[in-house]
Image (spheres, rainbow, N blue to C red):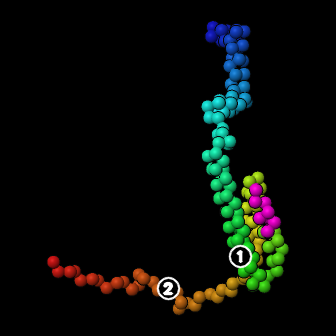
Amino acid sequence: MDLLLRLLERRVIVAIAVVLAAVWAGGRWGGYAQGRADLMMHPPADVKSPLAADIIKSSEARESAKLRGLHRVVSAEIAAAKGNGFKVEKFQRLADKALDLDTPKYRSAAIERLNRLRLAIPQKHEAFKPAAAGDLNPDLFDNPRPKAKAARR
């Protein structure tokens, strides 16, 4: 009983409220402090240095080459569909428009558009026929291998 009376004192209640408020505030705004500390410990790279500019330039060239390669693949699939008799002129125009988005800001959207366009290209329907019963693979366990003779030593 004495413990309960001590816990109900004003200073204990205030201390518990302060601890709970600190825990809540840490969960709510603690990420900001952590982000600021991380920024102070690891500042961003200086993009004005010639090495950083060279790395960024080569990275952009590589990403641009990936986009252009995907455009070539999509154009080849469109040409194959056109050879099969499908009307795909609209698809080629859309692929060319996606290639116009070859800037760092819009490159991921262009890749996504080309991949979606690649899925929409009509394919030639392949006719299948069921295999005959005699065409099945033979069961290897029905015909055991002949036993090998032991070699002389």
Examine the image and state in which quarter residue 73 appears: bottom right
Q: Residue at x 67, y 63 (%)?
A: 65
At 58% from the left and 90% from the top, the residue drawn is 132
Q: Residue 17: x percent and y percent?
A: 72, 18
Which residue is tagged 1?
76
Q: Is residue 99 magenta?
A: yes
| Magenta region | 96-103
Query: What secondary structure is found at the residue carrying circle 2?
Result: loop
Look at the image and tell me in which quarter the C terminus lies: bottom left
Q: Is residue 135 visible?
A: yes
Q: Pointer 2: residues within 10 angstroms few (<14), some, or many (20+)?
A: few
Estimate the x, y position of residue 143 in percent, counting from the top left. Answer: 39, 86
Quadrant of the rendering where the N terminus is positioned? top right
Which secondary structure, mark 1? Answer: helix
* Residue 34 appears in view: no
- Residue at x 29% of width, y 83% of height: 147
Marks 2 and 1 in Cβ contact (< 8 Å): no
Return the residue nearer the eye: 67 or 117.
67
Q: Is residue 81 above or below residue 37?
A: below
Q: Earlier in the sequence, mark 2 or mark 1?
A: 1
Residue marked by disc 2: 137
Picture residue at 71% right of the left edge, 17% below the top: 18
- State the separation of the CA atoms marked 2 and 1: 37 Å
Query: Which residue is at the front of the view, 126 or 84?
Result: 84
Q: Is residue 137 shown left or right of residue 93?
A: left
Number of marks in the rendered image: 2
Of 94 and 28, the residue lying toward us: 94
Q: 13 left or right of 92?
A: left
Image quadrant assignment for residue 69: bottom right
Q: Amino acid at mark 2?
A: Asn
Please identify the residue farthest to the left as the structure is shown.
153
Under mark 1, the amino acid is Ala
